[in-house]
Amino acid sequence: MSLALNKDFLRIASVNVNGLRAAYKKGMGEWLEPRDVDILCMQEVRAPDDVVRQLIGEGWFILHAEAEAKGRAGVAIASRKEPVATRVGIGDDYFATAGRWTEADFLVKNASGEDATLTVVSAYVHSGEADTPKQVDKYRFLDVMLKRLPELAKHSDHALVVGDLNVGHTELDIRNWKGNTKRAGFLPDERAYFDRFFGEEIGWRDVHRGLAGNVDGPYTWWSQRGKAFDTDTGWRIDYHMATPALAAAAFSAVVDRAASWDTRFSDHAPLVVDYRL
């Protein structure tokens, strides 16, 4: 059965929930219920599988990659229609139990009404820390992404990687970029990977940036410290990365920024994109 049977577009949302149990206590369910999302991708789920299914509730097919380390990472894909195939892991055994990458294949309708395949990935890249083993792991993960993205493009008619990728690609993606050039998340070597993802070598597209244009942000994460949220001193580190034809089908990208600091359910805001295939 193909997705988006009751409307002429597909709505895909991604959000780092910063702990699913805490997010639901703070109102995530009230955000999700009226949002008419077809596919919901989550990162930093940090909950056992039975808790995830209980909180998300009925009416969803759920693919959850729980991290082996309790209280760490965890990614999930919840969809209104059942995927035709699922996979957990990015293809490197080193990250097999890290809870940072999961893939689901769906049938969708293309412009001519025929079935096409869409692969959706929920990804959570390491935050890293400059000049530490954490940064080594981050670079290793990004290296594997360089290999996996072309494979996905060959595997399906359309492919989409969404999630918290923990890198601001350009100066537009961080409000205070000058003060962060030596911090993980805006290191030149990290940003160079995204040059390759979105350049001729890999050829994928940054959907949100393509729709927003050359403007500051729109940001998706704000530090819990100080008044970062109130002053919109944020980072755009949550992405929809798509193969070109899928990116061309995107017509709306919205950051569901909470009305106030105290009404947020996570330190990240959901990124919601509509695709008309």
Image (cartoon, grey):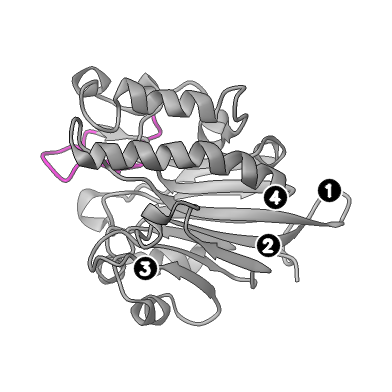
- Of residues 154 and 44, the one nearer the viewer is 154
> Residue 241: x percent and y percent?
54, 40
Which residue is the site of mark 1? Answer: 111
Which residue is the site of mark 2? Answer: 106
- Of residues 159 and 98, the one nearer the viewer is 98
User: Hey, which residue is sitting farthest top in the picture?
Assistant: 178
Disc 4 element: helix
Q: Is the residue marked by circle 1 packed among few (<14), some (14-19), or many (20+) residues within 10 Å?
A: few
Query: Where 116 sits versus 213, above or below?
Result: below
Q: How far is mark 3 from mark 1, CA to CA?
A: 36 Å
Residue type marked 1:
Ala
Mark 3 and mark 1 lie on one chain; the one further toward the N terminus is 3
Tags 4 and 1 in contact by the CB under 8 Å rule? no
| Residue 80 sits in quarter | bottom right
Residue type marked 4:
His
> Residue 153: x percent and y percent?
67, 43
Q: Is residue 149 left or right of residue 257?
A: right
Which residue is the site of mark 3? Answer: 66
Residue type marked 3:
Glu
